[in-house]
Amino acid sequence: MDLLRIDHQSAIPLHAQVEDLLRRLIEKPEYQNGKLLPNEINMAKKLGVSRSTIRQATNKLVYEQLLVRKKGVGTSVARKNISTKLDKWDSFTHEMDEKGMTFRNYSIKVSNVVPEKDIQQLFRIGPDATVLKMERVKGLDGEPIVYFVSWFHPRTGLTTDDDFNKPLYETLERDHHVVASVSKEGISAILADKKLGKLLSIDPGEPILFRKRVVCDAGDRPIEYNLGYYRADRFTYTIDIARK
């Protein structure tokens, strides 16, 4: 059935009919998968209405965050944002599994390195001590969403032979008897540079949600220093605060 039809004899305003048409259009699988909507000029000609009528209806759905308009590209269906709460924390894999979202590793790189001075001070290790460094890009099928960089204290016992495709904190507890108990975090907004743009398939200058995390054991000893770079168009941190 051709959805690009409206009733010019109806008492329903044209812009309202176009809005309803767009709402039905964006539910179609091909548009949910990233296909661009017909452009305003072509849609206006097809429906026999003015471009301002199309723009009025489109603006309503953009305001509702159902559509995304990019200059020079076109209008597409907004992808559902992924959120995580700040009142608890777990491994990223477990947290996304709870939401019914299966993330996969796009890449994993593990190496032994001499860390920078601030990490040496955090871990209270000597200037020549090496630590395990892990870099991961994770995302949904066809779409990288987050880039993680972690450094692990030597006391964790993690090595390059560990299976980092498995949930990290499960591996620490099961195989190395190290329990991650506390996460101390700082969150800020930055802009993607060329490296982040390439890793996350976005343009340099696009917004990034940047998170620093120090994970400690039950004795409040640092076991992991983690940097997370999340695509701001696909990820949201939320927090519930109770009034005292």
Image (spheres, rainbow, N blue to C red):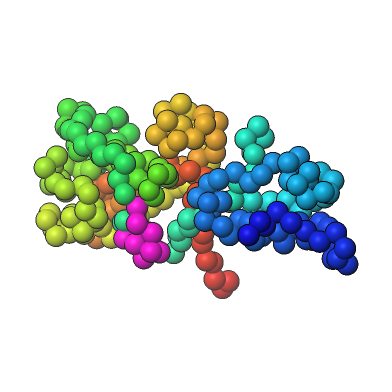
Image point (69%, 51%), residue name: 62
Q: Quadrant of residue 70?
A: top right
Q: Quadrant of residue 145?
A: top left
Residue 238 on image: x %, y %: 51, 59
Note whether residue 29 is visible.
yes
Image point (31%, 60%), residue name: 94
- In reply to whether residue 101 is colored magenta, the answer given is yes
Depth order, front residue of 137/102: 102
| Magenta residues (range) | 94-103
Note whether residue 89 is visible.
no
Left or right of 38 in this view: 49: right
Depth order, front residue of 184/83: 83
Image point (48%, 43%), residue name: 231
Depth order, front residue of 52/83: 52
Q: Is residue 97 above or below residue 214?
A: below
How many marks are shown on the rendered structure?
A: 0
Left or right of 27 in this view: 52: right
